[in-house]
Image (cartoon, grey):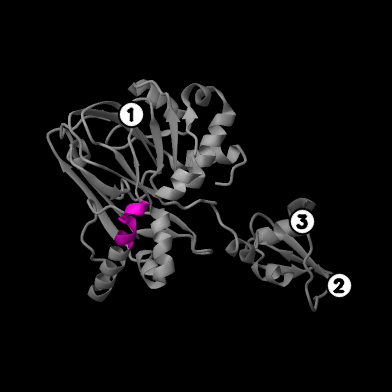
Amino acid sequence: MFGALKRSLGLAATRSQGLLAAGGGRRWWSLAGQSRACAGTPAALQLRDEFLGPGGHVSKYSHSWLAENSYEGKQKSIVQPRVLWNSDIYENANIPSAKWETFMSCNDELKNFLQNYLVYGIAFVDDVPATVEATEAVTQRVSLIRETTYGRVWSFTSDFSRGDTAYSQLSLDRHTDTSYFQEPCGIQVFHCLKHEGTGGRTLLVDGFYAAEKLRQQSPENFKLLAHVPIKHDYIENTANHQNHMTGIGPVLNVYPWNNELYLIRYNNYDRSVINTVPHDIVHRWYMAHRDLTTELRRPENELWVKLTPGKVIFIDNWRVMHGRESFTGLRQLCGCYLTRDDVLSAARCFGLQA
């Protein structure tokens, strides 16, 4: 192991100078990648857990810490533990919702909520007063609100007031939001304040569950979707709103050192022309995308939830897709986007892995 550590050790060059010793000699390592022998030229270096920096400061690191933070160690570890789910897996897990009053005053309730959110990509708070103000308050308990072209906290009905099918009574297929941002919004929040009619259930699909099924069945198709950059556009030109937003990135995003999936950008409504790769790759990409879509649309992967006044849902927009069945009558929905970094920061402050 420690031979691998010597190969991958970036420790001495990360913040200051480091010291390796062998026999009776010492060797200085600097940020510039230059070294000078202080006494002799050692024939073989031995790993030490002490490093000498500027001004004679000595930094000490345990062997376990060095192993954990080596490249080889990181290749074998995951960044975010998750439970990937279809509808049966999620329903059988029987995940409890947080309760409004406890959630707003008790850190243990917030910690449990964040743990559920990290593991499953969705989490609920029940008994929230059915107002925009209470919805804003419950979201700010979790993170900072990310203001977008839709505003800070939005509230809308099916009046087509914006150039978006969300502002209608139509059904919406599974998708992630803001794929037309260079960095899609991290968390989506919904609260149904009122519904006087039928239908309107919310569809939830774990995109990572479907993507990992694709990786098992066709590694080449998974790799193609993780490498081809795709353009998404949002164009709005009304009397009150003029926007043209463009985001470019692959459908699947993985960490390069361990191939762990961390983001899915899937939106057939906003996907633009594919002109970033040659024609033969475009054809292969569509075949790969079709296979992913087949997995996403399997009925057993669909979790349907009826949002009612008082039930607020938080959705990991980098992982879980949402949609909607058509509905009748007056339906008022409010919500917002939250900054992903601050949600993860809050979780880490509770000692959670995020």
Q: What is the spatial separation of the Cα atoms under label 3 and label 1, in whole angstroms?
A: 53 Å
The verdict on residue 300 being magenta is yes
Is 236 displayed left or right of 262 in the figure?
A: left
Which amino acid is tagged 3?
Answer: Ser
Q: Is residue 316 above or below residue 61?
A: above
Task: Specify the amino acid type for callout 1.
Answer: Thr
Q: Residues within 10 Å of mark 2 (few under 14, many from 20)?
A: few
> Which quarter of the picture shows residue 6?
bottom right
Which of 285/191 is in front? 191
Which of the two labelled residues, at mark 3 and mark 2, occupies the earlier sequence position? 2
Q: Which residue is mark 1?
A: 308
Q: Depth check: give the residue in front, 86 or 278.
A: 86
> Which residue ends up furthest to the left in the rendered image?
239
SS of the residue under disc 2: loop
Q: Residue at x 36, y 69 (%)?
A: 221
Identified by mark 2, the residue type is Gly
Q: Earlier in the sequence, mark 1 or mark 2?
A: 2
The first of marks 3 and 1 along the sequence is 3
Q: For numbered disc 1, what is the local secondary structure?
A: loop
Distance Cα–Cα, label 1 vs label 2: 72 Å
Name the mark on residue 260: none
Going 32% across and 35% down the picture, which residue do you hit? Answer: 306
Identify residue for label 3.
62
Element under label 3? Answer: loop
Q: Which residues are magenta?
A: 292-301
Q: Position of residue 313 (x, y in %)?
A: 39, 35
- Residue 298 spot, x, y in % from top left: 32, 56
Q: Residue at position x 22%, y 51% from top?
A: 269
Q: From the viewer's side, name the closer residue of 172 and 45.
A: 172
